[in-house]
Amino acid sequence: MSLQITSEHALFSPSQPSWINYDDVQLIEAFKNSHRSDLGTEIHEWSSIQIQYKSIVSNLKEIEKGVKTHIHDKYIREQISEKSRLYGATLIKHMDYLPKETYPTVKMFVNDSISYGMESESKVEYSECFWGTADAIKYDQGSKLLQVFDLKTGTRPGKISQLYTYAALYCLQHDLKPDTISFETRIYQSGDILTDNPPSELIYDLMKTIVHGDSIINKFKGGKS
């Protein structure tokens, strides 16, 4: 029997035998979810391009077609290798297994980010050890409002505390005092938007934690605190 292996690791591998106890439904769900994380990366890349070019999404079919084209151009059209082509084809096939809420969520995220004039895939950093890339972020000088939006394509509930850390890093990077501005954080996931307005004290505490952590690392490396 001839097999085409498109991954370096088996989905149902002896080294991770939890699947042995799966029932039929669990086996199918595991297969459907096997490329969910990879597809999430491609969806984020496509969304970032839409935001950068201020391309409002008008319907859900536009998202599905756009992501498929993005994957095709990245892995198949360029023909980097046969392995790349097979990987791209697999990702496109697995788009059929995405939850129905995925595309409406992406539409809300992209259009809201464009509407608010957000910067996409923006790096926020304090040091070489403490940094991150925000899906969408904006600080408005007039209203003194810092907004941080995050797109989640997985099913595990996102933690909005992650966005507080982006806000803290942004304040450190741009020398902003949390008690002089306000914050809005949003997680877009499963067709819903989780919104919060963290208090300045919380952001300030995170800033102190980051500064202290960086000092400890620098001391350990033999650098200056």
Image: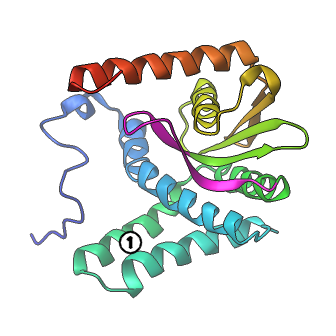
How many numbered dots are placed on residues in this image?
A: 1
Look at the picture and state if 19 lies above or below 219: below
Look at the picture and state if 172 lies above or below 211: below
Q: x and y percent of residue 73 in the render?
A: 46, 81
Classify 10 Å Cα crowding around label 1: few (below 14), some (14-19), many (20 and above). Answer: many
Q: x and y percent of residue 184 in the render?
A: 78, 32
- Taking the spot 40% from the left edge, 46% from the top edge, the residue there is 28
- Taking the spot 66% from the left edge, 20% from the top edge, the residue there is 203
Look at the picture and state if 1 lies above or below 115: below
Specify start and end residues of the magenta stretch as a single range. 117-133
- Taking the spot 53% from the left edge, 32% from the top edge, the residue there is 156
- Taking the spot 71% from the left edge, 70% from the top edge, the residue there is 61
Q: Does residue 78 appear left or right of residue 53 in this picture?
A: left
Seen from the viewer's position, the closer of residues 139 and 58 is: 139
Q: Amino acid at mark 1?
A: Gly
Residue on which disc 1 sits: 88
Q: Any magenta on residue 124?
A: yes
Query: Which part of the image, by quadrant, shows the C terminus?
Result: top left
Q: Any magenta on residue 126?
A: yes
Q: x and y percent of residue 48 in the render?
A: 62, 61
Q: x and y percent of residue 211 in the render?
A: 48, 21
Query: Which part of the image, by quadrant, shows the N terminus?
Result: bottom left
Q: Does residue 101 appear left or right of residue 213 in this picture?
A: right
